[in-house]
Amino acid sequence: MKKYLLILFSIMVLAVLSSWSYKQSDSLSNIEQLGKSIFFDKISNPDNMACADCHGPGVGFTGPDTAINNHGGVYFGAVTERSGNRKPPSAAYATLAPIFHYDSVGGFFVGGNFWDGRATGAHLGNPAADQALGPPLNPLEMNNPDKQSVLMQIASSTYSDLWEIAFGEPLVYSTPEEIDKNYDRVGLAIAAYEGSSEVNAFTSKYDYYMKGQVSLTTQELEGKGLFEGKGMCATCHMAPNFTDFTFENLGVPKNPENPFYHMDIVYLPDGSPINPLGNAYIDYGLGGFLQTVPEYASLAGENMGKLKIPTLRNADLRPVNDFTKAYMHNGVFKSLKEVVHFYNTRDDGSWPLPEVSENINNTGNLGNLGLTDAEEDAIIAFIKTLSDGYPLTSVPPAEAPREVSLNVMNPVTHASYVSFYLPVASHVRIGMFSSTGEKVTILAQGSYLEGNHKVTLFPENFKPGLYILHMTASGQEIVKKIIIAQ
Ligand code: HEC
Ligand code: HEC
């Protein structure tokens, strides 16, 4: 069953991906706009911290403070003396991670969000939606006392009317059921924004190059060749997401400036120290998480020190050239040159000891690559082509006629949406049928403009099970399966 859902999920990701390339404008749907408003709102205690304060759009949705990136690389929370243990990874392209699972054929773990995959996606059907439920309540991050206080801040915000537009009912939080359901919707709205064409933009020079709209320079092309060949980067950071969402221990050293080492004398609300181990703390990554999951605990040992391979999209995006970005889970490296040089020469004895010495990748795809200085620079030039927002100066070639598409997030566990794309304005009808063919409801019927549209689906209105969606538009017909699983 799990496998079936995963296959469906991958199909969905592909479907969504292909529909993105059709998107023409940056206009957001209602739920995406709601998620965006929440993402940039300082919903914290005290009210000084938004998601965007650790995931700034101008730097590819990662840490936006050059001074912090120059040193610890780890951000402090709303309570300003408390810090977490890791560098913020990009919140862009995170929605494309599959649900965390063990690939028993390959013998490795894949997917989830966070450096250790622990936002699995099992709760809301998408790791990024699960992930978004964490920071508002984390005492090291936004530090809100409970879910209700998060909902109250949204209800009293200037964008509160968007909630009712997106979900078809007002934001209420009187009973525990209402609180849980609506807090989950906060996660869904944020993930909708994170999955929108504004965040997962695919507007880099590389993307335009792949569509034949621009050419790469000689150095960028050489870098692309090295990235895929001698440098072996693409064995882990593969296109189009520049990660395969698996986990590896590269043997990256500790970052001695990580403020978490000093969190032995800073306390949580319950009086316990944030990091009782102080300087002796070691980040065990995936293995550390697996230890806490009974089903996977026996596999923890072989995964100690492994971290999720991050996307390289926007790895170089920065507001000005001398803005420092910190790289790796602990922000130990301060430039792409340092990163590439590490891959090239890790095994030459000149680097500090690895943070975790078990399970280091020694399969030959890093450590002693024999790249010249100029080849390192060419790889960096290629990584720079992965920054979104590349200004297209030439007129794009005429595209092939575009087709109607219909996208469904499977399985539907909580309020979610069915989206469709129309190449031209047309009459649309989307019927929902039981697996035996009886009509259950009509999700959409009427005339719609050209572009992307979304219909919210409330799974609680249906019996759990398999349904069929039948869409007609512009003389085309699309049939998709949808699974309601509450
Ligand atoms: C205080 C800084 C901070 C704040 C505030 C914060 N984050 Fe993060 N975020 C992090 C760090 C650090 C990680 C990595 C943590 C880990 O791996 O254990 C992370 C991880 C993530 C990831 C996972 C990306 C991936 O590919 O695995 C996403 C998505 C994300 N954050 C989105 C959000 C959203 C949405 C909010 C607001 C609700 C938010 N963050 C608030 C620091 C922050
Ligand atoms: C064996 C898999 C593997 C290979 C091969 C690989 N990477 Fe990575 N890459 C990772 C992992 C895992 C991390 C995170 C490691 C950590 O945080 O300790 C990472 C991190 C990075 C980062 C930092 C990104 C961030 O957001 O902090 C960059 C940049 C990078 N890799 C570039 C490259 C380049 C360039 C190459 C080829 C020279 C390469 N990688 C080869 C797995 C790999």
Image (tube, rainbow, N blue to C red):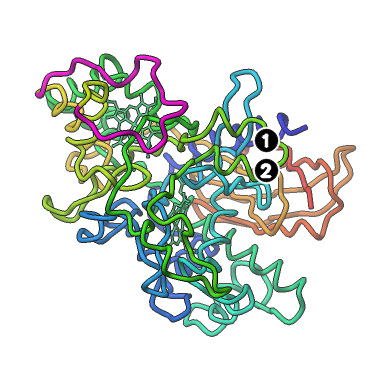
Estimate the x, y position of residue 255 in percent, counting from the top left: 30, 47
Q: Which mark is residue 268?
A: none
Estimate the x, y position of residue 300 in percent, counting from the top left: 60, 34
Estimate the x, y position of residue 137 in percent, counting from the top left: 55, 68
> Which of the two residues, 290 or 65, is positioned nearer the viewer here?
290
Residue drawn at the location 49% of the way across and 41% of the way down? 285
Quick one: SS at disc 1?
loop
Q: Which residues are magenta?
A: 350-373
Residue drawn at the location 43% of the way across and 70% of the way down? 266
Vertical position of residue 70 compared to residue 215: above or below: below
Q: Assess whether mark 2 and mark 1 are in contact (beta carbons under 8 angstroms).
A: yes
Name the residue furthest bottom.
Answer: 156
* Amino acid marked by disc 1: Tyr
The residue indicated by pointer 1 is: 296
* Amino acid marked by disc 2: Val
Ligand 1's quadrant: bottom left
Magenta segment: does it hold 370?
Answer: yes
Vertical position of residue 212 compared to residue 418: above or below: above
Residue drawn at the location 51% of the way across and 55% of the way down? 449
Residue drawn at the location 77% of the way across and 71% of the way down? 177
User: Which image quadrant is residue 171 in?
Assistant: bottom right
Q: CA distance from mark 1 to mark 2?
A: 5 Å
> Which of the two residues, 199 or 119, is positioned nearer the viewer here?
119
Q: Main secondary structure of the magenta part?
A: loop
Quick one: SS at disc 2?
loop
> Which of the two residues, 211 or 486, is positioned nearer the viewer here?
486
Vertical position of residue 68 compared to residue 60: above or below: below
The residue indicated by pointer 2 is: 293
